Structure formats: C-alpha cells, structure tokens
Amino acid sequence: MRVLLIHKAKSKLEGSLLLRILCDNIKNLNLPKKIQFDLIQLGLEINENVFLKINDFNRIFFTPNFIDVWKNRKKFRYNLIINLDNSLYSFFCYWVLYSDRKIKISRKKFKNINDADDSEREKIIAESVLKQINGDNFYQIKLPSLNVEEIKLLNTKKIINWILESSGQKKLEFLNFIFIYFRVNNPTSQIKKVNNLIEEILRNTNHKVILTIDNSEKEIVKLVQKKIKINKDIILNFLSSNDIYYSLKFCQKSKTTITNIGYMCVICDVIGCNYIFPKESELTNKNISFISEHINYYSEKVFKS
C-alpha cells in the first residue's frame, strides 16, 4: 500500500509530531502489512528530529514545482493521499495526483483549532485523519516513542554533570530542582514575570531552579541574564541550551517541568514526567498563581513520596 502525505511547515519542528503519529498509527490499523509512505514537504525543509524519522518515508519531495507535479501525476499512483495543509498549492497536489482514495482536513476544522497550541493542533489533526481512515470510527492515537540516540543522551548527562560540578552544584541525579523551559515572545514584560515565577517557587519549596529560554537571539539571552536576580538556587548555566538532549535530561531528573511549549509537554508525556503547562503561553499573575498551586500540590503529594 502506498500512502502520500502532503504537509507544510513554518518552523523546523512544526508537523514532525503529526507526521510521526500518522506513520506509526496508520501501520496499526487493519491495513495491508507493507505500507510505503511518500511525503510532499512544502514550506521549510524539516530534518530528522526528536519526533521525525526520515527513514519512515520512501521518498520525500521538497516543495516540488507545478510542472514537476503535473508531469509526474501519472507516474506516481497512490492508494491513499492525505492532505494535512489548507494552502492552494497543497490542494493542487492533492487533486492532480492519482490515488484510489483521498483524505483532507476541512477548512472548518482548521479554523476551530487555530488557537490551539502547536502540538495539540497536530494531535487533533492526526485523530481526524485516523478517524476518516478507520471508517469514521473513533481512534485513540498512540504517542510515538522519541527518536533519540542513547549514547548521545548519556554523553549529554556527563557534560551537564561536569558543568554543574564546575559551578559548585551537585550532579544531576542528586540535585533537587524544578526545570523551567520557556519561550519568551515579549522580553521586556515576560522576563520580569519569569523572575516573579522563580521567586515564587524558591519561596514555597526547597528546590533549585534550572532555567532555559527557548530564544536563540543573543540580545534576549543577555537581557535575561541581566534581569534575573542572582541567587545560588537559580542555575543559569543552561540558559540558552536549546539542544533537545539537554531538555530531555532535565525533564527526566527534575521534580517537575514548567513550560509554555506544547512539544515539551508531549515529550514529558512520552517519558512519563511531571509537567505544568500554563493555560496561556504568556506569563501573567493569574498563570503564576496557577503554577504555584500545582507546585504546592506536587510538594505535598508527589515530591515527598
């Protein structure tokens, strides 16, 4: 069975979870055992990452032009074409290429999930597609395992421990800490809120805080370093460590992870870690209270166990 997925990404990680969920779960449906996946990737070229396995695909076509698609419309025949995008060009590919069956996401569905977090939106789209394949019967998606190299994960742990010990901290496995991994969209106001959140945590627990900011801009990192009040319980050595292997180790070893990034929540779900996901992506006093309540709960029910 040959399946073509048509997908568009605006960032390097966007859609990776969706593609992996579909590849894994379609194989679990009552379909022919041998399934080959092809991918038309529009927008940014996405590479192998913590979710996506490139070898899941037989062929990947990166933004093919109109002429190539038209010329090859009879050459590549599929049993199933799934359009995961709502752009005009994706619909051109969807309608022109030959297939026994075609599935798409309605514009109404895209509109309804427009305000959802990226990872939540991808899970909703995956459920919609799988439900259509499964004869409109409800299908409970299974989250994929993470695509990581164990040796690299082990070496990352060694590097983290060396950095911690060099700065007078305990090794990761002996460190009581809460991991904060935040995307800061409005540095001027948000950094102050992040600092308020950290102070709230330190005031109500006896845990240290490891802070990582998901912004590669040097100006933002410098601003965070300047604005966050210096404290022996705040570890800023990994402030700009956006390597997913660092985040994985921190999630695994922390008492809980606080993040406004949906993909990190999925990672925590997969590896079975506690996490707190604020209802709004930007920190507010209301969100800080929400997080504080959960921290207090974990302190009473989880951290002590």
Image (tube, helix red, strand yellow):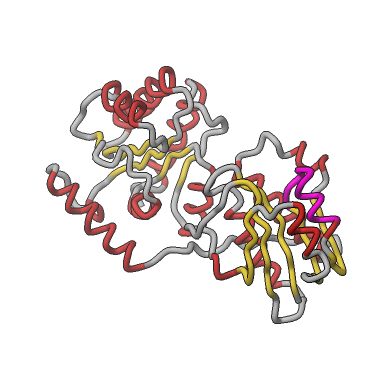
Q: Residue at x 21, y 26 (%)?
A: 230
Q: Is residue 54 magenta?
A: no
- What residue lies at 25% left-to-right and 34% top-to-bottom? 234
Residue 90 in the image: state x and y as whole percent. 76, 50
The spot of residue 4 in percent (x, y) is 73, 64
Residue 304's place in the image compared with 117, above or below, is below
Q: Which residues are magenta?
A: 84-95
Q: Nearer the viewer, residue 231 or 181?
A: 181
Residue 159 x/y as whole percent? 22, 55
Q: Is residue 23 left or right of residue 89?
A: left
Going by the image, does 13 lie left or right of 168? right
Question: In the rendered view, would you say 68 is above or below 204?
Answer: below
Say if 292 sits above or below 271 in the image. Answer: above
Task: State whether residue 296 appears in this view.
Answer: no
Front residue (pair 149, 143): 149
Visible residue check, residue 197: yes
Dividing the picture into quarters, in which one does residue 19 lie?
A: bottom right
